[in-house]
Image: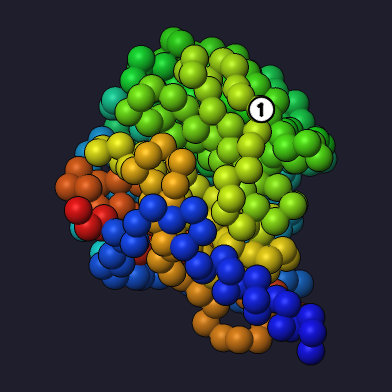
Amino acid sequence: MKAILDIAALLLASLAPLCAAETSPIQILDRTVIFTHTSTDPKDPANTSGYNLGPSIALLPDGRLMAAWFSSPSEGAESQRIVQAFSSDQGRTWDKTTVLQDIARKADFDPALFVAGKETFLFFSAFDPQIDIYFRRSSDSAKTWTEPVKINQPNHTTRSNGIQLSTGELLVPLHTRGTKAGGVMKSRDGGKTWTRFGAVANPEGQGGEPSIAETNSGKIHMMLRTKDGQLWRSISADKGETWSAAEKTGLTATSSASHLLCNRDGTLVLTYNPGPTPLRFPLLMRTSRDEGTTWSEPTLLADRPAKVGGWSICYPALTELPDGTIVAVWAQIKGSPGELYGDIHAARIVLKK
C-alpha cells in the first residue's frame, strides 16, 4: 500500500505547476486515431501491423501532413517496417496506411521526418544485428523518394525530427546506443554530407533520444531522456557544433522520449511522460515563453484508456501548421502476457494568447 501511495504522490507532483510561469495556454481542439492495430498476438505470422510505435510527423511543402512510424508483430521483428499516412485536412482525418520503407531481413525503426524548403527528409535506423542510419529525400512532397543512403555513423540512431536552422543548415538529433549520449548530425550543403557534433549526457552518462529546437535567439535547445526521474537540457550557441554541460530542467519525467518544438512566435512547446519510471503515462504538454527558464502548468494531452493492462502513452512528435495550430502524434501501447499491440493517435492543439 505504501508503494502505491508513493507512486500516486509522485504523479500528483508531476502535475503540479513545477517551475510554472503561467497557467497553461494550451487548448486541445480534437483527437483522432491515425491507425489501429490489426492483431494482438505477437506470435501470429500473419500479424504484420499489430505493434506500432515511434511516430514522426511533418508538414509537407504541398500542405498535407505526413505521419510515419514503425510497424511489426513485436518490436525488433525481422518483418518490422516503416509505414505512412497522410492528412489533407490539417490532421482532422487520415487516409489509408501504406508501406514507406522496408529493407529485406532488417528491422527498420525510428523514422524521423523534417522539411527544408521544398525537400522532405526521412531518417531511419535498421538493424540485423548491426545498427545503421539511413536517409531518403523527396522533392515532390513524399510522392516519390530517393533510394536509402547509409550514413557512416555506426552504433548511432535517430529518433526525433530534424530542423532547418535560421542559417539554412540542417540539423538532425541522434544518440549513441551504448552510452546513450545525445548529439547531432549537421549538413551545410543541403543534405549531401553530414558531420556529427556533441556527446551530451548527464553525470551518470545518460542522454538518450534527444529532441532539438532553435529559438528566436538563435540558440539550439536539446532535451534529453535519462533514468534519474527528470528531463535534462543542453544548449548550443554555435548552431549545434558545441554544447553546454547537461543540466536539470526541474521537470519530472520517466525514461522515455520527449519532443520539443519552437513555434513561429518563439514559444517552446514540450510534450513528455511525467513518470515516475517505469510508467509511460500520462502524456503531458507544457510551454515556455522564456526559452525554458520557466514552464507553464501542464495540460493533459493523452492518458491510458484503462487503469489496468500495461498501457504506455508515449513517443510523441509535434509539427506546426501555417495558422499556428500544432499537430501532435503518439503511440498507445498495450503490453500484457500473451497480448501486445499499439495504435497511433493524433491531436490538434492551439496556444491561447
| Whether residue 325 is situated above or below residue 8 in the rendered picture | above
- Relative side of 275 to 88, left or right: right
Which amino acid type is shown beneath numbered disc 1? Answer: Ala
For label 1, the residue is 245
Determine whether, in the image, residue 278 is placed left or right of residue 72.
right
Q: Quadrant of the N terminus?
A: bottom right
Q: Residue at x 79, y 84 (%)?
A: 2
Tell me: residue 214, above or below residue 333. Answer: above
Question: Total label count?
Answer: 1
Q: Is residue 155 above or below residue 340?
A: above
In the displayed structure image, the side of residue 158 where residue 215 appears, left or right: left
Q: Position of residue 192 (x, y in %)?
A: 49, 13
**123 or 293: which is nearer to us?**
293
Image coordinates for residue 71, horizontal then vertical, percent: 59, 58
Q: Nearer the viewer, residue 182 or 235?
A: 235
Q: Residue furthest bottom?
A: 1
Residue at image point 52% right, 82% down: 305
Residue density around tag 1, few if under 14, some if 14–19, many if 20 or more, within 10 Å: some
| Residue drawn at the location 64% of the way across and 37% of the way down | 247
Determine whether the residue tagged by mark 1 lies in a helix, strand or loop.
loop
Q: Nearer the viewer, residue 43 or 120?
A: 120
Nearer to us in this view, 39 or 194: 194
Relative image position of residue 351 (x, y in whole percent): 26, 55
At a point 62% along the width and 57% down the height, the residue shown is 253
